[in-house]
Amino acid sequence: MRRKVVETVAGGVGPRIVCLPGLGARGQGFAALVDALRPWAAPSWVDYPESRWAAVGPDRLAAEVLSQVGPVDLVVASSYGGLVAAHLAHAGATRAVAFVGSFLRPAHLGWREPLLFRMGEMALWGRPGPLTASIAAAGWVRSERAAEIVPTTLLERETVRYRVGALRPETLAPPLAERSGLKYLVIQGERDFLVPPSTAPKLLRDLPPETRLVTLPDAGHVPYFSHPGAVAELLKGWLPEVLHGNGEGRASS
C-alpha cells in the first residue's frame, strides 16, 4: 500500500517529462506514451498514495510529487491530474503543462460537476471494469488492461473515495492566466464523454490567451492510452517552443 507518491522512470535522455494520472487511474496507463517519448526524452509516470493516505487535496499532492520527482520540463496531466499540474506550474516546478482531458474548476464540467463529487461513491459501488474503461477510451478495452485506466480493485476504489473527499474549493487549481513564462497545451479527445469537448473553451479561459487547443478525432478521455503515438508527436512538435532558449532541457543540464 503506497503511503506516498511513487515515480516510475522509463529511462531515456532529453527533456524531463512526468505523467500524472486521473482520480483512479494507474500511472501504468501511460506506458505506451512513455515508450513513444523515450527516444527523445526522459519520461516517467507517478502513482499517487493509496487508502487514507490519498485524503489530501491537489495542492498537497503536488507538493508530494515535487518532493519525489523534482522540477521537470513538462507535465502531461490527465483529468484530475490537471489540478495537481496546475499547482506544480504555479510553484515554478515545470516549464509547461499539457492538459489531457483536464479541468481546473468543477464548473468547467457543466452538468457533470455534481458527478465529480460523487465519483468516490460511484467507484466504490459501481465496480468499474472493462465497460467503464471502454467508455473512457471511446473504444473497446480488453479486461486485462482495464485496470490501467479505471479503479478495479477494492483498494483502488476506496482510494478514489478518499481522494474525492479531500477536494475543497481552496485546494483546487490556482490562477494560471497571469503566471508568466510558462507554456500550456490543451489536448482534447473529440469523443471524450467524461470531460467533453465543451469543457475545453472554459479551460482555455483560465489559461494564457496564447494557449493552443488540439482536438484528437476518435479519441476519448484517455488519448495517452488509446492514441499514444498521436500524443507523442504533438508533444515532440511542441517541446522546442517550451525549451526555447535552453534546448537541452533540465534532464541534460
Image (cartoon, grey):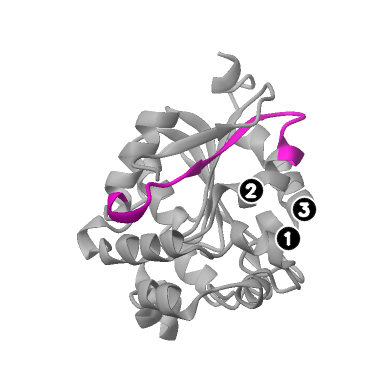
Q: What's the CA distance linking mark 3 and mark 1? A: 9 Å
Q: Under tag 2, what secondary structure?
A: helix
Instruction: Name the residue that disc number 3 marks.
Output: 230
Question: Measured along the vertical axis of the image, is residue 201 above or below residue 159?
Answer: below
Residue 5 is drawn in which quadrant?
Answer: top left
Q: What's the CA distance linking mark 2 and mark 1? A: 10 Å
Mark 1 or mark 2, which is nearer the start of the sequence? 2
In which quadrant of the rendered image does the N terminus lie?
Answer: top left
Q: Is residue 6 magenta?
A: no
Q: Position of residue 59 (x, y in %)?
A: 29, 48
Amino acid beneath label 3: Ala
Residue 30 placement, left or right of 55: right
Highlighted magenta segment, given as a residue range:
35-53
Residue 27 placement, left or right of 59: right
Mark 2 or mark 3, which is nearer the start of the sequence? 2
Q: Under tag 1, what secondary structure?
A: helix
Q: Is residue 45 magenta?
A: yes
Given residues 95 and 50, the one toward you in this image is: 50
Amino acid beneath label 1: Ser
Identify the residue at horizontal 65%, vertical 31% (top origin). 10
Disc sitting over residue 226 in the figure:
1
Q: Position of residue 205 (x, y in %)?
A: 44, 64
Amino acid beneath label 2: Phe
Instruction: Name the residue that disc number 2 marks.
Output: 30
Residue 120 is drawn in which quadrant?
Answer: bottom left
